[in-house]
Image: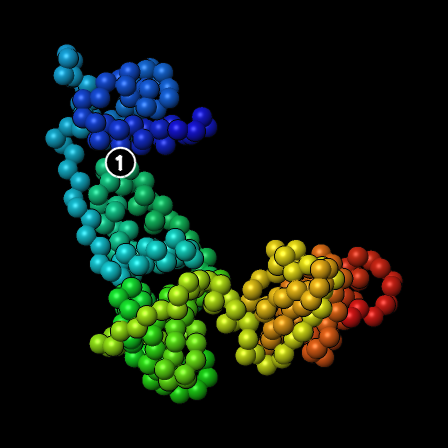
Amino acid sequence: MKPDASPTARALLALELVQGSPGITADRLAGKLGVSERAARRYVAILREAGIPIESLRGPYGGYRIGRGLRLPPLMFSAAEALGLVMAVLDGHHDAGDAADPVGSALGKIVRALPEPVAAQVQAVRRTTAPAPDRAAARPDPDTATALVQACSNRRRVRLRYRAEAGPERVIEADPWAVVVRHGRWYLLCRSHTAGARRAYRIDRVRGVEVLDDTFTPPTGLDPVATLEEHLAVGWEYDVEVVIDAPAETVGRCLSRALGRLEPLDAGTSRLVGSTSNPMWYAEQLAAVPAPYRIVRCPELQQAARVLGRRLLAAAGSDDDATVT
């Protein structure tokens, strides 16, 4: 236990030790917690004040043990509830107060398993917390995400009903390699048999999943996160090429793979090749490069860099009207 751990944290660890070692003595409990025997007794008192019946018996077979008054019901989560809790951890869920929502339903089960004094405090926070919804997040339907995660695990081909931001719904057959979460969006990284190529589909746009009998073998040594980043860097409206006066291993530490493929030109120079639909965003990412660079392809990106450069000069209070390229 860290020396700066709170009394509540130590009390919870004490509860775990008493549950795992019925009959544990105060001095053994103190040794496990790394505190004095007096402090260990104080943590037991905190647990009793919270309504947890901890009994203490004297004699050679004595010590602390959980009393018969504590009977925690088993927690049985549905797949949607379990995945909902994972989503809540990953991107901050704001429907935890809604009992009809999978996260709210799972949280309700956890609350009902807590000692009454503790549960009362949790419920008070749950009732009074005012959520600030993350409007940029795109959370998929938990049942859809669960089906795709299971298909990835079982290596079963799927048939998707998919609707992009614009256009009609279409049917896609794919080998689901992995589910990847990136910046609040959930993607299915897969081999699309319909397109005959690698694809990344937004799971929040999947309208239906049918798991097929066909099986598949994913690519050897697949790195889902790196592969997704590389995939999202190609196929956009504007092709980009940037030459950077620094080694690729140095530049790679400060640039996202989503910008494109970074490759060495010589010992001290590297080249970034990618594409974008948002030249200004791309220019802002390039501004993080700690070395001189030249945009050798993409007039739209060159113009965005000029605008960004003038904006930065103005923010610094400079009268320099030099052209930034």
Q: How many marks?
A: 1
Which image quadrant is residue 322 in? bottom right
Residue at the limit of the structure toward the left, as seen here? 68
Which image quadrant is residue 12 in? top left
The answer to whether 231 is drawn above or below residue 61 in the figure is: below
Front position in the image: 60 or 73: 60
* Colour mapping used in the image: rainbow
Question: Left of 271 or right of it: where is 147?
Answer: left
**Image location (x, y in percent) of residue 175:** 34, 74
Q: Does residue 273 appear anywhere in the picture?
A: yes
Residue at the limit of the structure toward the top, as seen here? 59
Local secondary structure at mark 1 = helix
**Image location (x, y in percent) of residue 257:** 56, 64
Q: Does residue 137 appear anywhere in the picture?
A: no
Question: Left of 325 or right of it: where is 300?
Answer: left
**Image location (x, y in percent) of residue 48:** 24, 26
Q: Residues within 10 Å of mark 1 (few under 14, many from 20)?
A: few
Residue drawn at x 37%, y 49% is: 128
What's under tag 1, amino acid-wise? Pro
- The N terminus lies in quadrant: top left
- The C terminus lies in quadrant: bottom right
Q: Which residue is mark 1?
A: 117
The answer to whether 52 is drawn above or below residue 257 in the figure is: above
The answer to whether 13 is drawn above or below residue 273 in the figure is: above
Which image quadrant is residue 314 in? bottom right
Residue at the limit of the structure toward the front, as seen here? 267
Residue drawn at x 58%, y 62% is: 256
Question: Left of 139 or right of it: where is 268?
Answer: right
**Image location (x, y in percent) of residue 122:** 32, 43
Front position in the image: 228 or 139: 228
Residue drawn at x 26%, y 45% is: 111
Residue drawn at x 84%, y 59% is: 318
